[in-house]
């Protein structure tokens, strides 16, 4: 059936080919690849895939296809790299509409020339596409002030498994008409449909930025410094911590943004607060430190995303295995773990700590053979509702099958 | 979507619920039921079949379970201040009123959160956190009486959402009774809870996906400095130009509010707010944040207002004066009662840059029909609240006002906006949904509803013009696929 399938796909999409050795998702090879150019073409491809009974994974740059679990089966990759247009940038309204395959770094460049930004940062985010960023819900230091993907996405166009094109939200920031489907697609790893277009709220680029960093004497001092920044009124855009191996020193980093005239006074005030609480001098710098926004593990992992309530920070810093870095402000961290048989224990240890503080630990990426024997997701509340949701959106379970929680 | 309920069925259900909740929490008396016949949108009235006043999540779950088992529809209601008929009762259904669930369970500034029951009044959250210097950001005009549960259902905004976002940005988690009576947690006390963001879908779902029984809200630290000015312009075009200049300068004010001449006239008549005489439009601009930042951006805002032609600018010297500026704005809806016996409060959104054009078209509509329209709006985010004036007693006026109000929504849609920015779709605007969304869009949204409420008993008839039958999976095995016709695919 190989040739007929390819012919069938060709009827739907101008650019299709048999997969090569590079066309894999977390080690699982695809059989065909389609490069649609528009929402309509994605819809045609998915209608054809329905008729042919194909299992489908959407791919942007492919940088985060190893997140979650490998698909339980894969026939067709829908590659969005031909969908890179900025469809509309209403600069005066601080809103942008793009196709899903646009690289985040290219989007930021275009917006930057208007002195605007999509307030999503971090190397994970900037390395991928708009669609990939939504599907994986990556975030960086700026989420402390501006929120994450879910908070900035104001409209979305998706194609469901059966080819249905659906849009929710709109192109205005304030809008409560209808269900906010964008939230469901954020972090869904491609299991509910293929994201084809997105609309984001933008923010002005600040005139000036400063980073204030201090290495705390110990974890208690580091946590105290974070708490002091929370309790103060300096309105930072980011509040980060960086800790190497357990027992190592902890760096606390704060970013402030604003008008040039006020920035130095504000940075100095933060520095004096930090040095007092951390027990070590604080430095004001005009560029982010080199660790800023970078996950403390290589792209292939193993790495985990952990969350905890603010009051759990001391304990997390003191006892979490691996290298830990992230937004102490938002309570979301990346942890680099050991690529050995100890991975299972380290993950369990992280879960013990974080669940004590209302949080969770999810293994983001690791080699497929390690993930095969691990509980990647940990406990998931309301899983029954999630399964029902999947059944409604993709009743035949052909989209990214098995990559998400509970085998979804 | 079966209709097995009838009067007799509700009688049985009333007895069953009385056994669970006690007689004081179940209302069956027709006169008392009438108290609940409408929410803040009084033009829609339906006397509920039964009203219950549960005091705990477990009681809500028991009520919902009983309703689900009996196939009886139910509607949740908080303070009943909604402006879209979202809490309009069902004549053969149960109205679940959450006002007795008004405990603030926890205020925890160190963890930047509070945990509240759904009946807690919005402003009470801020009051509880204020002594420690924290607040709950969503501030709808009704914040003195509206409930947090209602805010969650409607994804309420308020004047300050330009900078701080809506309810959805300030809720971390919720304990929810699902339409089949199960108690589940969506989200939690931390961000990025594993799995689908069901909390994000739940907030703003207008009571159609379940009933929140506990809500974890974010608290924000009070800003160090708040500065507010009131600028008077000869007309809305000049005021609109000032807003554009402020935004183009990269300033994100906490709030930018505008009122036109008719709205000012009403506010003066009602609360004597003492706005500058002869103003065709006033702008209230509020900035907050670190003093060193606010001081400089406030000077820029002042400059932009002058540059756009403000003939008078007043700067609030203290909190009392700031409150006075806001008094006129906050009273505007009710104040219109002073200049017109009846009025419709409309809620539409346009891209902010389309403001001058849309306001001109609204003025043309008004001139062409003779229907007066007062404009009050959140100018920073293009959220219009035109107040369409009429006199019920005069034949044809109500109808004409209704038509103008609808035409304003069409203008919003034409300009790429929305039919509602914060009041919700509810009962009132379900019929407008097909103007903004395709049948496929609406059908896809209802797939979400089917996942939560396959029986269609949870606040039925709201948001969507046509309910979807959940048993049917659309698009599947429908007709002959072109590939099959072409002989390329054999199996479906």
Image (cartoon, rainbow, N blue to C red):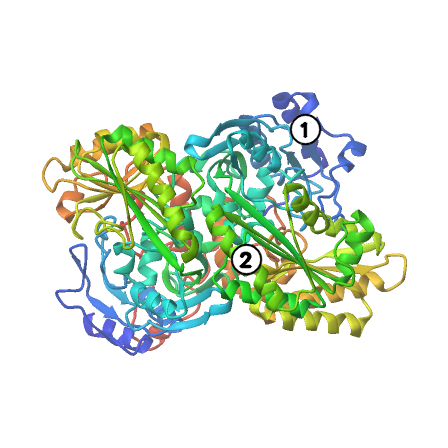
Locate residue A240 relative to residue A63 in the image: left or right.
right
Task: Depth check: give the residue in front, A398 or A119.
Answer: A119
Q: Is residue A192 above or below residue A364?
A: below
Residue A56 point in image, percent of width and height: 28, 61
The residue under label 1 is: B14
At x 66%, y 36%, the residue is B94
Quadrant of image for the C terminus of chain B = bottom left
* Secondary structure found at label 2: helix
Residue B314 point in image, percent of width and height: 67, 54
* Secondary structure found at label 1: helix
Q: Chain of mark 2?
A: B
Crowdedness of circle 2 by 10 Å Cα count: few (<14), some, many (20+)? few
The residue under label 2 is: B299
Locate residue A341 relative to residue B65 in the image: left or right.
left
Locate residue B221 relative to residue A386 in the image: left or right.
right
Q: Is residue A310 above or below residue A73?
A: above
Is residue B49 visible in this depiction of the protein? yes
Locate residue B358 relative to residue A218 in the image: left or right.
right
How many circles with numbers are drawn on the protein? 2
Q: Chain of mark 1?
A: B
Residue A197 point in image, percent of width and height: 40, 66
């Amino acid at each position: 059936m190989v040739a007929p399938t390819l012919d069938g796909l060709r009827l739907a999409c101008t650019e299709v080919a048999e997969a090569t050795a590079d066309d894999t998702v977390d080690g699982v090879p695809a059989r065909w690849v389609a490069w649609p150019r528009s929402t309509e073409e994605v819809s045609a491809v998915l209608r054809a895939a329905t008729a042919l009974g194909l299992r489908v994974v959407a791919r942007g740059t492919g940088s985060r296809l190893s997140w979650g679990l490998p698909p339980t089966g894969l026939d067709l990759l829908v590659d969005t790299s031909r969908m890179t247009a900025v469809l509309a940038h209403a600069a005066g309204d601080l809103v942008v509409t793009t196709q899903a395959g646009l690289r985040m770094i290219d989007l930021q460049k275009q917006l930057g020339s208007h002195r605007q930004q999509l307030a999503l940062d971090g190397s994970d985010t900037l390395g991928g596409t708009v669609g990939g960023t939504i599907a994986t819900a990556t975030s960086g230091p700026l989420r402390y002030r501006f929120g994450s993907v879910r908070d900035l996405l104001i409209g979305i166009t998706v194609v469901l498994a059966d080819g249905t094109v659906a849009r929710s939200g709109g192109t205005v920031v304030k809008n409560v008409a209808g269900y906010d489907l964008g939230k469901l697609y954020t972090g869904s790893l491609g299991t509910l449909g293929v994201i084809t277009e997105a609309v984001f709220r933008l923010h002005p680029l600040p005139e000036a930025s400063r980073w204030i960093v201090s290495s705390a004497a110990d974890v208690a001092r580091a946590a105290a410094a974070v708490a002091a920044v929370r309790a103060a009124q300096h309105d930072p855009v980011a509040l980060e911590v960086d800790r190497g191996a357990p027992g190592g020193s902890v760096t606390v980093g704060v970013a402030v943004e604003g008008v040039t005239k006020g920035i130095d006074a504000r940075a100095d005030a933060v520095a004096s607060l930090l040095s007092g609480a951390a027990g070590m001098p604080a430095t004001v710098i005009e560029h982010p430190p080199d660790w800023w926004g970078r996950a403390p593990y290589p792209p292939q992992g193993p790495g985990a995303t952990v969350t905890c309530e603010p009051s759990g920070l001391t304990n997390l810093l003191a006892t979490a295995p691996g290298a830990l870095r992230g937004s102490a402000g938002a309570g979301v961290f990346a942890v680099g773990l050991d690529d050995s048989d100890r991975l299972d224990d380290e993950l369990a240890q992280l879960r013990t700590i974080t669940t004590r503080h209302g949080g969770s630990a999810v293994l983001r990426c690791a080699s497929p053979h390690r993930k095969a024997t691990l509980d990647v997701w940990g406990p998931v509340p309301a899983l029954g509702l999630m399964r029902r949701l999947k059944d409604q959106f993709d009743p035949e379970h052909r989209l990214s099958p098995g990559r998400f929680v509970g085998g979804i | 979507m079966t209709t097995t309920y009838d009067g007799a069925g509700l009688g049985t259900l009333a007895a069953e619920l009385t056994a669970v909740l006690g007689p004081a929490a179940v209302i069956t008396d027709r006169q008392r039921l009438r108290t609940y016949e409408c929410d803040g949108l009084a033009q829609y009235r339906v006397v509920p079949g039964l009203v219950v006043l549960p005091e705990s999540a477990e009681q809500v779950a028991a009520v919902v379970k009983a309703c689900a088992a009996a196939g009886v529809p139910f509607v949740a209601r908080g303070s009943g201040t909604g402006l879209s008929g979202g809490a309009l009762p069902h004549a053969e259904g149960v109205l679940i009123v959450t006002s007795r669930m008004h405990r603030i369970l926890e205020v925890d500034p160190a963890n930047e959160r509070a945990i509240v029951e759904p009946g807690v009044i919005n402003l009470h959250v801020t009051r509880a956190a204020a002594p420690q210097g924290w607040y709950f950001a969503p501030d709808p005009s009704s914040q003195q009486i509206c409930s947090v549960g209602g805010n969650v259902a409607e994804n309420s905004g308020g004047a300050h959402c330009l900078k701080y976002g809506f309810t959805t940005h300030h809720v971390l988690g919720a304990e929810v009774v699902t339409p089949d009576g199960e108690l589940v947690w969506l989200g939690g006390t931390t961000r990025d809870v594993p799995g689908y963001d069901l909390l994000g879908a739940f907030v703003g779902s207008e009571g159609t996906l379940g009933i929140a029984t506990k809500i974890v809200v974010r608290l924000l630290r009070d800003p160090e400095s708040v500065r507010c000015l009131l600028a008077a312009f000869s007309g809305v075009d000049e005021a609109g130009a000032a807003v554009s200049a402020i935004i183009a300068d990269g300033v994100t004010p906490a709030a930018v509010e505008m009122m036109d001449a008719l709205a000012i006239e009403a506010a003066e008549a009602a609360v004597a707010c003492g706005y500058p005489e002869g103003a065709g439009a006033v702008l209230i601009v509020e900035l907050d944040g670190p003093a060193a930042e606010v001081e400089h951006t406030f000077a820029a805002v002042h400059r932009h207002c002058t540059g756009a032609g403000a003939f008078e600018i007043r700067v609030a010297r203290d909190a009392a004066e700031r409150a006075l500026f806001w008094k006129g704005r906050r009273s505007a809806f009710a104040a219109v009662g002073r200049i017109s016996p009846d009025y419709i409060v409309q809620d539409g959104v346009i891209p902010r840059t389309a403001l001058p054009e849309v306001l001109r078209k609204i003025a043309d509509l008004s001139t062409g029909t003779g229907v007066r329209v007062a404009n009050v709006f959140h100018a920073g985010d293009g959220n219009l609240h035109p107040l369409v004036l009429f006199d019920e007693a005069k034949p044809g006026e109500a109808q004409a006002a209704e038509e103008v109000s609808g035409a304003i929504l069409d203008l919003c849609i034409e300009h790429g906006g929305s039919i509602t920015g914060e009041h919700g779709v509810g009962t009132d605007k379900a019929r407008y949904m097909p103007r903004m969304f395709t049948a496929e869009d609406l059908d896809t949204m209802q797939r979400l509803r089917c996942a939560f409420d396959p029986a269609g008993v949870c606040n039925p008839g709201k948001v969507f013009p046509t309910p979807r039958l959940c048993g049917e999976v659309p698009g599947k095995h429908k007709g002959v696929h072109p590939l099959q016709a072409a002989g390329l695919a054999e199996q479906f």
